[in-house]
Image: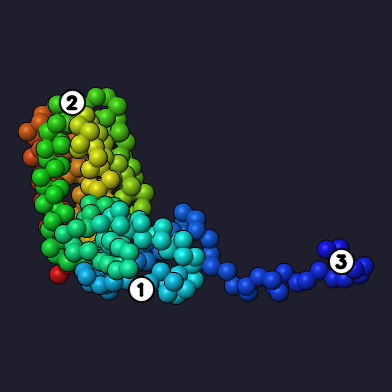
Amino acid sequence: MTKAKGEADAPESATTPTRQPRGTGRRLRGAIAHKLGLAIVSGEYAPGDTLSGEIAFSEALDVSRSAYREAVQVLTAKGLVESRPKAGTRVLPRNRWNLLDPDVVAWAFAGSPDIQFIRSLFELRAIVEPAAARLAAERRDRADLKAMKDALAAMRRHTLATEAGLAADRDFHDAILRATRNDALVVLSASIGAAVNWTTQFKQRSRALPRDPLPDHIRVYDGIAAGDAEAAGAAMRALVDLALEDTRHAME
C-alpha cells in the first residue's frame, strides 16, 4: 500500500527485537564449544550429566540456537557428548573422549590436569616418539633435516618461554614424524604437538624451566642426521623421560 504524503517510516526498532543473538559463524561456534568443552573436561559437568536444553543454553549464552547446535556437534565429534531425541545432550564417560584431540588436550591443561592424564600423555610419547626417531634416521631426506635444523635454530633464538619458541618445538617434533614416511604416524602429529606444547607450558606456570632442553633435542637431531637409528631412538627416549621428570617437579 502507498504511504500518505509526509508519512514517516516506522523506526526499525519498532519491528525488530532490541537484542538479537549473535551470529552462527565459525568463531562463535568455536567459542561456545570451548566454553562447554572446558566445563566438561574440568569436571563441572560429570559423565552422565545432561546439559541444559538448547533454548535455555542459547538464551544463557546470548547466542542463536543454531550456533549452540553446531557447537554440540563439535563436542560430539570429539566424543565428549551424545545427543538423543527427547533425552537431550548427555556427557559421555571419559573413556569415550578423544583424549588425543588437540582441543581436548588444551582444555585439560586450561585448569589443573590430573597426574594420571599427564602420565598417559607421556606414556604415549614414550611409545611413539623414540620409534619415530628411529624410522626418521633411516628415511629422512635433506628437506626433513633442514626443517628440524630450522626448528632448533628458532628454539635457540626464542627459547621455550615464548610462543615462537613453543611453536618451533612443535615444528621439530612434527618434522620427525613426517620424516618417518609413515602416514599413520603423521596423523598423530597434531596430537603429539599438542602434548608437547601444553606440557611445556604447564612446566613454566609457576617457575622457569629447571634446565635447558635444547641439548636434548640436538642429540635427537644428531642421531637422525647421522642415520643412526639406535642413537636417535635412545636420545628421544631420554628427552621424553626428562620432560616427564620436569613436569613432575612442576606439580610439586
The answer for how far apart the CA atoms under marks 1 and 2 are is: 52 Å
Q: Which residue is mark 3?
A: 3
Instruction: Write the residue at 90% across / 68% down.
Output: 4
Q: Residue 148: which disc?
A: none
From the viewer's perspective, is residue 108 above or below residue 221?
below
Q: Check disc 2 and give the amino acid type.
A: Arg
From the viewer's perspective, is residue 116 above or below residue 127?
below
Relative image position of residue 98 (x, y in whole percent): 23, 54
Q: Check disc 1 and give the amino acid type.
A: Ser
The part of the image, by quadrant, that contains residue 189 is top left
Q: Please state which of residues 157 and 136 is positioned toward the viewer in this rendering.
A: 136
Instruction: Write the residue at 33% across / 47% down.
Output: 167
Q: Earlier in the sequence, mark 2 or mark 3?
A: 3
Q: Check disc 3 and give the amino acid type.
A: Lys
Relative image position of residue 51 (x, y in whole percent): 32, 71
Assign the N terminus to one quadrant of the image.
Answer: bottom right
From the viewer's perspective, is residue 191 above or below residue 138?
below
Query: Outermost residue toward the right?
Result: 5
Relative image position of residue 46 (x, y in whole percent): 23, 72
What kind of colouring is applied to the model shown?
rainbow
Q: Residue 52: which disc?
A: 1
Q: Earlier in the sequence, mark 3 or mark 1?
A: 3
Q: Residue 139: which disc?
A: 2
The part of the image, by quadrant, that contains residue 199 is bottom left
Relative image position of residue 157 (x, y in whole percent): 34, 45
The answer for how far apart the CA atoms under marks 2 and 3 are is: 79 Å
Instruction: Write the residue at 47% across / 73% down.
Output: 59
Residue 28 visible in the displayed image: yes
